[in-house]
Amino acid sequence: MMDYRKHIANGSMLNTPPVFAVYVCMLTLRWLDAMGGIATIEPVNNQKAKLLYDALDRKPMFTPTVRPQDRSLMNVVWIMENPAQEKAFLDTCKSNGVVGVKGHRSVGGFRASLYNALPLSSVQYLVEMMEHFAVTHG
C-alpha cells in the first residue's frame, strides 16, 4: 500500500491509503523526534512503568495480573483484591479526573495506558490517588 509504484500501476485504484492514520503517524514521529527520540523517551517510559508497578506491588489491595517478567511498559493491568471495592475505586478515579482506567468488558479489572505522550506527572497523580484510596478503603 505504501509503494506508490503499485498505485500508479493500478491507475490509483489499488486502495485508498488511510490518510488520517498516516498523517497522525507523521505528527507523532515528528513530536517524538523533537522530544529527543527514543533515547530520550525510553527512560521516561521505564520510569512511568516502574512507578506504577511498584505502587501495585506495594499495595495488596491492588493485584497486577501479569507476571513481572511479562509486564508491558505501555499497558498496566490489575484487579482489586476485593472485587466489591471496584465501583468505589472507579468512582474515586472519576471524581479525581482519572478516566479510562476501567478494564476491558470481557476481563474486567483496570488498565492504565502509559503511552509516550502521557507525562510522568499523570502517573504520579494516579499513584497518589491509589495510595490515598488504599488508606481510606483498606
Image (cartoon, rainbow, N blue to C red):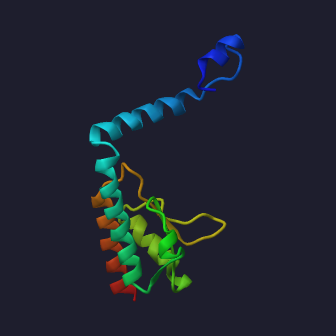
Percent from the top left, x then y, of residue 78?
Answer: 50, 74
The answer to which image quadrant residue 35 occupies is top left
Image height check: is 36 above or below 124? above
Seen from the viewer's position, the closer of residues 118 and 71 is 71
Check the picture and name the quadrant holding the C terminus. bottom left
Is residue 9 placed above or below 20 in the rendered structure? Answer: above
Q: Give the residue at x 32% y 79%.
A: 132
Q: Nearer the viewer, residue 66 or 107?
A: 66
Q: Could you tell me which residue is drawn at 35 percent across and 61 percent down?
A: 46
Q: Is residue 32 left or right of residue 21?
A: left
**Depth check: 102 or 50 in front?**
50
Q: Identify the residue shown where x is 36% and y is 77%.
A: 55
Query: In the displayed structure, does residue 12 sit left or right of residue 21?
Result: right
Is 17 located above or below residue 72 in the figure?
above
- Residue 123 appears at what percent x and percent y? 33, 63
Q: Left or right of 84: which side holds 15?
A: right
Give the residue at x 65% y 16%.
7
Q: Quadrant of the N terminus?
A: top right
Counting from the top left corner in percent of width and height, residue 22 is at 51, 30
Pinpoint residue 114: horizontal percent, then vertical percent.
Answer: 41, 58
Left or right, 37 with reference to 25: left
Quadrant housing residue 52 = bottom left
